[in-house]
Amino acid sequence: MKIATFNINGIKARIEALSDWLGEFQPDVALLQEIKSVDEGFPREHFEDMGYRVETHGQKGFNGVAILSRLPLEDISRGLPGDESDEQARWIEATVIGDAAAVRVCGLYLPNGNPVPGPKYDYKLAWMARMEAHARDLLAGEMPVVLAGDYNVIPQDEDAAKPEAWREDALALPQSRAAFRRILNLGYTEAIRARTQVAGLYSFWDYQAGAWDRNNGIRIDHLLLSPQAADLMQDAGIEKAVRGREKPSDHVPVWIELAA
């Protein structure tokens, strides 16, 4: 089972780039962030024609997450538990029925949190605390769980080309990194770091100041695996070359392959 996460930065602007990548890479499950579309505006039929079931949790103009799956989906839920007043569309989850195992996949778009200090950073940390509580609850089910998406967290200095430029940014502040580690420490495995500890692996390059040409990137798109999912992992990677294509997102896909 090949599962990928991809912040596409607008489904309408990126439909051709996304379609090309889906056709080439052929993921069984694609978890999308920043679709920037209400559910009714998502080009569902286009992706259904490509063989994908489509589930969305959209919002007008910004945020929004989606699941595209070539495998059956069950028990779909939308919204991160813990705050019924939260109207931002940042979480979607479902059970994917694979040939060998069922996997609970959670697609997430974690708040950016800038500027700091301020209410946006407070919201980010509160959201991460809610995610930690839900991630703990998911472990109790003892099934393979994958928490995948744009975390807007640079876990360590090795995950930025210029770590000094991010010292005061919400993505790399000690509180953000600690909140990320608390989720990991529940028993989750960060897929890419389970494969390699090398520096220079990035999943985001800003559109500004020639960041892509100078490889001035950061790694903020992650897949966290429960112990049952980690036992099934066969491979993981980052599709860096996608960033150099026509009308790209500022993020690239990150993926895992499970024996499921």
Image (cartoon, rainbow, N blue to C red):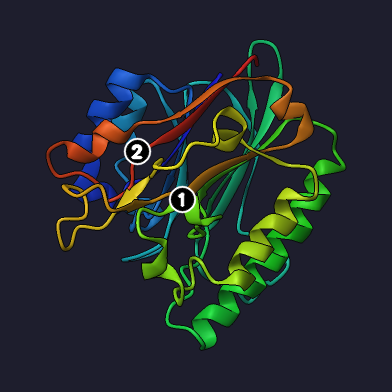
Q: Secondary structure at mark 1?
A: helix
Q: Position of residue 223 (x, y in %)?
A: 57, 40
**Kind of residue indicated by mark 2:** Arg
State whether residue 81 appears in this view: no
Q: Nearer the viewer, mark 2 or mark 1?
A: 1
The label on residue 159 is 1
Using residue 33 as the reference point, say whether residue 129 is left or right of it. right
The C terminus sits in image quarter: top right
Query: Which class describes the residues within 10 Å of circle 2: few (<14), some (14-19), or many (20+)?
Result: some
Name of the residue lying farthest toward the bottom: 118
In the depicted structure, whether residue 203 falls above or below residue 46: below
Q: Which residue is mark 2?
A: 44
Query: Which class describes the residues within 10 Å of circle 1: few (<14), some (14-19), or many (20+)?
Result: many
Q: Position of residue 165 (x, y in %)?
A: 36, 69
Front residue of this view, candidates 99 and 252: 252
* Sequence order check, earlier mark of 2 and 1: 2
Name of the residue lying farthest toward the top: 99
State whether residue 74 appears in this view: yes
Using residue 143 as the reference point, say whether residue 192 is left or right of it. left
Q: Residue at x 46, y 50 (%)?
A: 159
Q: Residue at x 48, y 22 (%)?
A: 28
**Kind of residue indicated by mark 1:** Asp
